[in-house]
Structures are given as C-alpha cells and as structure tokens.
Amino acid sequence: MMKHIVLLIIFSSSLTSCFKSVDQVDAETTVLVQPFEGMEKDLVDTVLLTFKEVYGVQAYTVPSIKIPDYTFVNIKSPRFRADSLIRYLRDSIYPKHDQVDYVVGLIDEDISTTKYSDYSSRSIKSPEYKYKDWGIYGLGFCPGKSCIVSTHRLKKGTTVENFILRLKKVSCHELGHNFGLPHCPNKDCIMQDAAETIKTIDNVELHLCDDCRKKIGLPIQ
Ligand SMILES: [Zn+2]
Ligand SMILES: [Zn+2]
C-alpha cells in the first residue's frame, strides 16, 4: 500500500496523483489543527473555521508544540523538512488523539522537500536531476492522516487580507489531499495544482468543485 506524497510546489506541476480510494467526509469527520511554535493563534482559529465552512467537518486545535530538531536542514537556506514533519504528525501526534481523523500542522517557518525532475525539465537537466531541498507552501499524504502548511512564503508580496486567503486555500488544498483528492482540472477549484507560481493560488476560489465534492461524499452545492 504505497502512499503518495503530493506537493504544492512553487515552480513545477510535476505531481504524483492519488491512486488510492478516496475517503468519505461528513459532519463526524474530525480534524485536529496542530500549530508549531511561533504560529499566531488568530491564524490557527481562521483555519479551523475554514475547514468547518468548506468541508463541513469538526475541527479543533491544541497548544502549539516544538518543531522537532531533526527536521531542520540548511542546504539552500535554514528551514524545516516538510516530509519529515508530516511523518512526525502522523506517527507522533495523530496516535495521541483518539477522536481525530486527520492532523493538519501549521508552521510559520519555511519548509522544503526534495523535488524530483519531471519530463519537462529534461531538456535542461538530466532525468535524474533533482532539487535536494525545495521550498514549498504545503505538503500532504494522499490519502493519509497528516499534512503541513507553512505561512512563510504565503506572506510575500501581498496584503494581510490576501495572505490570510492564501492560507485558507492552501490549508483546504492539503487537507483535500489527505481525504484522497487528486489535483483537479477545474479552474476555480481549490484542488487545482499550484503549477507555476503563487498566482495560481491567488486565482483559484476558496471553493471545492462539484466533481471533487462528489468524490468525498459532500452534497452538491
Ligand atoms: Zn496539491
Ligand atoms: Zn475540483
């Protein structure tokens, strides 16, 4: 049972699809929002409310926790590994909460993962070329029990209002991957691939399309 990690990455759309079954989401589905140290409480509360509004799930939070030291890297710049963080949330935080179905980590620090090259990059790089440490907005198992969203890159070059909107969108996107939703071709859907730039995030609506809603058992709006 291989789980695919799906990335919301900055400069590439080379993503793994969700091939496994999609979870059914309802009013009993419970999401824990786990902040890491340094995360603003108001932002955590905003994400909680957004999950309730967009997915109709129950959501709650707990006090922030220390970022595990072993997730720190300093390859291109000092930051934390998203792949290590989602494993930590799945293996060390999720089992502590009996009633929880999914854990969404929120972090104020920059996060990164390894980016493997895709076909489109072969003209300039060898197929094996990869970026060892690539800055991202968020990362989540698809399907799976945990995901992480970083506010670090979402703040850049925008207003406070739009930063908060970006945070809502990326949080819903990563949680959608946990439910088993793959990227969606519908242009206004929250599950659209971030593709080339932050502009894609700015252009999507805070909205889950009917195709995606059907897959996870939510009523059509
Ligand atoms: Zn994605
Ligand atoms: Zn969709």
Image (cartoon, rainbow, N blue to C red):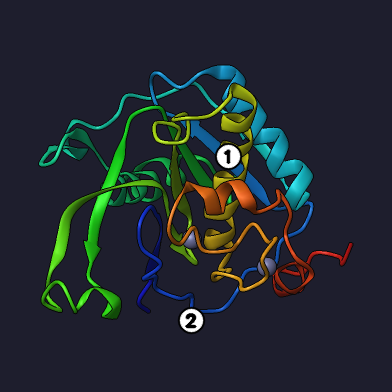
Report the disc number at residue 15. none
Q: Nearer the viewer, residue 34 or 133?
A: 133
Q: Position of residue 143 (x, y in %)?
A: 50, 67
Q: Position of residue 22 (x, y in %)?
A: 60, 73
Kindly report the distance in space between the C-alpha atoms of the residues bearing marks 1 and 2. Answer: 27 Å
Callout 1 touching callout 2 (CB < 8 Å): no
Q: Quadrant of residue 89?
A: top left
Q: Residue at x 66, y 34 (%)?
A: 48
Q: Quadrant of residue 176?
A: bottom right
Q: Is mark 2 within 8 Å of ligand 1?
A: no
Amino acid tagged 1: Arg
Report the disc number at residue 19. 2
Q: Position of residue 206 (x, y in %)?
A: 70, 48
Q: Residue at x 66, y 47 (%)?
A: 30
Q: Nearer the viewer, mark 1 or mark 2?
A: 1
> Which residue is most to the front?
123
First reached walking from the N terminus: tag 1 or tag 2: 2
Q: Is residue 2 above or below residue 80?
A: below
> Label 1, on which residue?
166
Q: Is residue 39 above or below residue 148?
A: above
Q: Residue at x 40, y 27 (%)?
A: 108
Q: Nearer the viewer, residue 189 or 93?
A: 189
> Which SS class for mark 2?
loop
State left or right for residue 193 relative to residue 219: left
Q: Quadrant of residue 162?
A: top right
Q: Position of residue 210 (x, y in %)?
A: 79, 69
Mark 2 surroundings within 10 Å by alpha-carbon count, few (fewer than 14), some (14 through 19), many (20 or more): some
Which quadrant would the N terminus be assigned to in this image? bottom left
